[in-house]
């Protein structure tokens, strides 16, 4: 089965012009026309936008199934990660990746029905700004309760805003036998900032059950205005039958 996934930090629907316009974000996502939308910074807890149900509104605009993982709920306002998809959602779970005295962060897992009893596990996440914070979050992500139980037989995609400024992959995820699609396909895939994308903050990792086919930042006049990040679009094939058993889980020490 060939599918398209986009990972996109929508910046609470606030564009580079400082205007809140969730319909504009919806237009960008229609341009991409992906089967799976993994979104970050959905909603607003700082009071910068109208208090509305951003994830539900986007799902209604696009006519897609929705899973939402709020990481902050304050005065009726929710903020976190979302997954919208044309595929049936079997179940979803939100994992807390928060580090004390830092902004609350999380990873939303969504198990999608590919048919014939096959699932696709998709994680949409938003990592912290400091190196130490991200290392602790990677350890949480690789713990028994998050990735290990998802990867026994079904393909896995882990994507989002990693806030990783270096050119290489996230080492902890690579040790878990997840592959950086940008490096596998040898494309730069820079998404930040939108006007002059120099940094690869947004990334998509896959395991051996997923074959990446093409990867590109979606750069159009509209996407350059709608958020401070460009959407990162992956076309892939899944599931891929793996002939040999996968490696046992790797735990980080320290």
Image (spheres, rainbow, N blue to C red):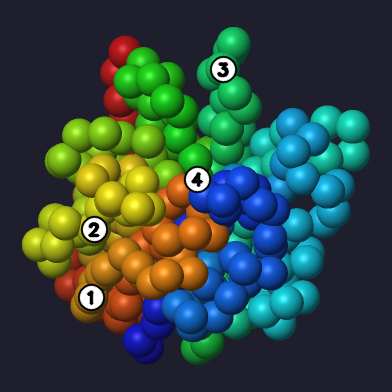
Which of the image's four quarters has the N terminus?
bottom left
- Gap in Å between the C-alphas at discs 1 and 4? 21 Å
For the point 36% across and 62% down, which residue is it? Answer: 232
For the point 23% across and 58% down, which residue is it? Answer: 189
Judged from the image, the secondary structure of the residue bearing numbered disc 4 is: strand
- Counting residues from the N terminus, which is met first, the one under dot 3 or under dot 1? 3
- Counting residues from the N terminus, which is met first, the one under dot 4 or under dot 3? 3
Judged from the image, the secondary structure of the residue bearing numbered disc 3 is: loop
Residue 20, position as x, y percentages in the image: 69, 53
- Counting residues from the N terminus, which is met first, the one under dot 3 or under dot 2? 3
Kindly identify which numbered label has been placed on residue 125: 4
- Gap in Å between the C-alphas at discs 3 and 1? 35 Å
Judged from the image, the secondary structure of the residue bearing numbered disc 1 is: strand
- Gap in Å between the C-alphas at discs 4 and 2? 18 Å
Residue that numbered label 3 is attached to: 102
Residue 14, position as x, y percentages in the image: 62, 50
- Counting residues from the N terminus, which is met first, the one under dot 4 or under dot 2? 4
- Counting residues from the N terminus, which is met first, the one under dot 1 or under dot 2? 2
Q: Taking 47 as reference, is 20 above or below it? A: below
Kindly identify which numbered label has been placed on residue 189: 2
Instruction: State the image quarter where residue 82 is shown.
Output: bottom right
- Which circle, 3 or 2, is nearer the viewer? 2
Residue that numbered label 1 is attached to: 214
Q: Can residue 252 be seen in this snapshot?
A: yes
Instruction: State the image quarter where residue 84 is shown.
Output: bottom right
Judged from the image, the secondary structure of the residue bearing numbered disc 2 is: loop
Q: Are marks 1 and 4 in contact (CB under 8 Å)?
A: no
How many numbered marks have been drawn onto this rendered protein structure? Answer: 4
- Gap in Å between the C-alphas at discs 1 and 2? 11 Å
């Amino acid at each position: 089965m060939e599918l398209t996934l986009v990972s996109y930090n929508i910046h609470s629907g606030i564009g580079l012009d400082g205007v809140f316009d969730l319909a504009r974000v919806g237009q960008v996502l229609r341009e991409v026309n992906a089967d799976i939308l993994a979104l970050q910074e959905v909603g607003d807890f700082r009071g910068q936008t109208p208090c509305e149900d951003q994830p539900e509104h986007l799902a209604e605009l696009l006519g897609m199934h929705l899973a939402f993982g709020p990481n902050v709920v304050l005065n009726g306002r929710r903020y976190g990660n979302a997954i919208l998809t044309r595929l049936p959602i079997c179940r979803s779970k939100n994992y807390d990746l928060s580090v004390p005295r830092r902004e609350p962060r999380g990873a939303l897992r969504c198990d999608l029905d590919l048919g014939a009893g096959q699932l696709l596990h998709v994680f949409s996440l938003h990592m912290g700004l400091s190196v130490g914070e991200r290392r602790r979050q990677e350890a949480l992500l690789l713990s028994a309760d998050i990735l290990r139980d998802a990867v026994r037989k079904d393909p896995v995609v882990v994507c989002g805003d990693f806030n990783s400024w270096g050119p290489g992959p996230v080492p902890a995820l690579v040790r878990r036998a997840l592959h950086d699609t940008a490096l596998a396909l040898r494309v730069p895939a820079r998404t930040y900032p939108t006007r002059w994308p120099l940094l690869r903050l947004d990334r998509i990792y896959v395991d051996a059950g997923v074959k990446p086919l093409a990867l590109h930042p979606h750069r159009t006049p509209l996407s350059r205005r709608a958020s401070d990040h460009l959407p990162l679009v992956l076309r892939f094939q899944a599931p891929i039958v793996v002939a040999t058993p996968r490696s046992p889980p790797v735990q980080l020490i320290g």
